[in-house]
Amino acid sequence: MDILKSLHIIFMVSWFAGLFYMVRLFIYHVEAQEKEGQVRSILSNQFVIMEKKLWWIITTPAMVLTVVFGVWMLVLNWDYYKQAPWMHIKLTFVVFLLIYHFICQKIMFQFHQNKFNWTSMKLRLWNEVATLFLVSIVFIVVLKDSFNWIKGVLGFFGVAILLMIGIQWYKRLRKSN
């Protein structure tokens, strides 16, 4: 079980790294559209290559392996996990994370068709959604049954508010430079 748990954590870390970097590439890809002619074309072509490789070689395989090892652990300890409320909550967050993953894939496909419906600011906010999932999932798993729901909910929204303040501060800083 410890080997499965280790592999699950390793691939979860890889999956999140891929998601974080993918959205960062999206931000740069959108900002490249503000460049002129050949520079925009060269940058866009490079971002398409980088996004495809990151998505299909790292992010999606890491997602699949995270799910495989997670399901494997669930099956091996089904009697415990089906009675564990924290696991139900964790799995709910994982479902939302999978939806996030496939929305990112949709964004990538749109960008590769030169459809840029997201601003760099909206993408910066979107990138923080993955951070909220990460924080929530880790706290749920680590604290398990001792999880204090009031503190958990306040902490979750506290992190969200701090992220929003940080993003607004960064936006002002960029405008002043």
Image: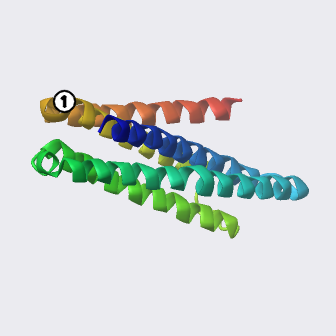
162 or 99, nearer to the observer: 99
User: Left or right of 168: which side holds 177?
Assistant: right
How has the structure been colored for display?
rainbow
User: Left or right of 136: which side holds 59?
Assistant: right
Q: Decide if residue 119 is in sight here.
A: no
Which residue is tagged 1?
151
92 or 158, nearer to the observer: 92
Crowding near the residue tagged with mark 1, few <14, some 14–19, many ≥20 C-alpha atoms within 10 Å: few
The image quarter containing residue 132 is top left
Q: Decide if residue 51 is in sight here.
A: yes
The x, y position of residue 76, in whole percent, is 23, 49
The image quarter containing residue 118 is bottom right
The x, y position of residue 67, in whole percent, is 38, 53
The x, y position of residue 85, in whole percent, is 13, 45
Residue at 26 percent across and 51 percent down: it is 91
Q: Amino acid at mark 1?
A: Lys
Extreme residue toward the right, this view? 38
173 or 42, nearer to the observer: 42
The x, y position of residue 11, in whole percent, is 46, 43
Quarter of the figure that contains the C terminus: top right
Secondary structure of residue under mark 1: helix
Residue at 29 percent across and 39 percent down: it is 1
User: Left or right of 128: which side holds 84?
Assistant: left
Residue at 48 percent across and 43 percent down: it is 16
Residue at 19 percent across and 47 percent down: it is 77
